[in-house]
Image (cartoon, rainbow, N blue to C red):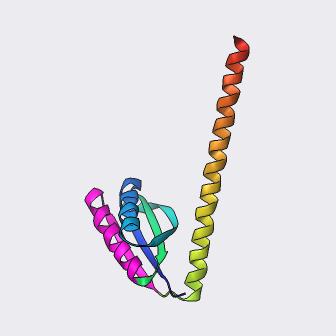
């Protein structure tokens, strides 16, 4: 792989979102995954995984760490330039997990809409 993998581990979702926002604006990178991690600093951490060209990922991670530390605490960050093929397989797993999460959110939204519609229909029939 000629790309790089960037990792930012932040305390809390707000810090992670701020870091991701800054990282995404700083350079041309792609979010390939994220994970909630219980136990980081005796709290819940969020690990963000970014991919892109080496220089872009370095710039994005640096910007993300700086922005995250303004909002909360960033525990760790690292850039792996041109990772081994085995790490590339891990990146593909991250991407699959990210897409599964998106599909789950869509299904949950659809179920919520269906439940709301059902509730509305019940209210209409009572009138």
Residue at (34% x, 76% y) in the render:
59
User: Residue 16 occupies which quadrant of the picture?
Assistant: bottom left
Location of residue 32 in the rendering, given as x and y in whole percent from the top left corner: 53, 69
Judging depth in this view, the residue of 106 and 86 nearest the camera is: 106
Magenta region includes residue 17: no
Q: In this view, does 1 lie above or below 92?
A: below
Judging depth in this view, the residue of 68 and 31 nearest the camera is: 31
**Residue pushed farthest left?**
70
Residue at (71% x, 13% y) in the render:
126
Taking the image as shown, residue 116 lies to the left or right of residue 15, namely right
User: Residue 62 occupies which quadrant of the picture?
Assistant: bottom left
Location of residue 96 in the rendering, given as x and y in whole percent from the top left corner: 63, 67
Location of residue 120 in the rendering, given as x and y in whole percent from the top left corner: 66, 24
Quadrant of the drawing holding the C terminus: top right
Residue at (68% x, 30% y) in the render:
117
**Main SS class of the magenta portion in the image:** helix
User: Residue 74 occupies which quadrant of the picture?
Assistant: bottom left
Find the magenta span and give its range. Answer: 55-81
**Residue pushed farthest top?**
127
Quadrant of the drawing holding the N terminus: bottom right
Magenta region includes residue 78: yes
Residue at (32% x, 62% y) in the render:
68
Q: Is residue 45 above or below residue 85?
A: above
Location of residue 50 in the rendering, given as x and y in whole percent from the top left corner: 47, 72
Can residue 11 be seen in the rendering of this structure? no
């Amino acid at each position: 792989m000629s790309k790089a993998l960037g990792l930012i581990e932040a305390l809390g979702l707000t810090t992670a979102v701020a870091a991701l926002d800054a990282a995404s604006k700083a350079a041309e990178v792609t979010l390939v995954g994220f994970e909630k991690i219980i136990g980081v600093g005796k709290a819940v951490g969020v690990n963000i995984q970014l991919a892109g060209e080496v220089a872009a990922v370095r710039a994005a991670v640096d910007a993300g760490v700086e922005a995250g530390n303004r909002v909360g605490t960033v525990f760790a960050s690292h850039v792996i330039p041109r990772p081994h093929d085995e790490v590339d397989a891990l990146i593909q797993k991250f991407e699959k997990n990210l897409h599964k999460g998106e599909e789950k959110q869509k299904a949950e939204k659809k179920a919520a809409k269906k439940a709301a519609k059902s509730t509305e229909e019940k209210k209409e029939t009572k009138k």
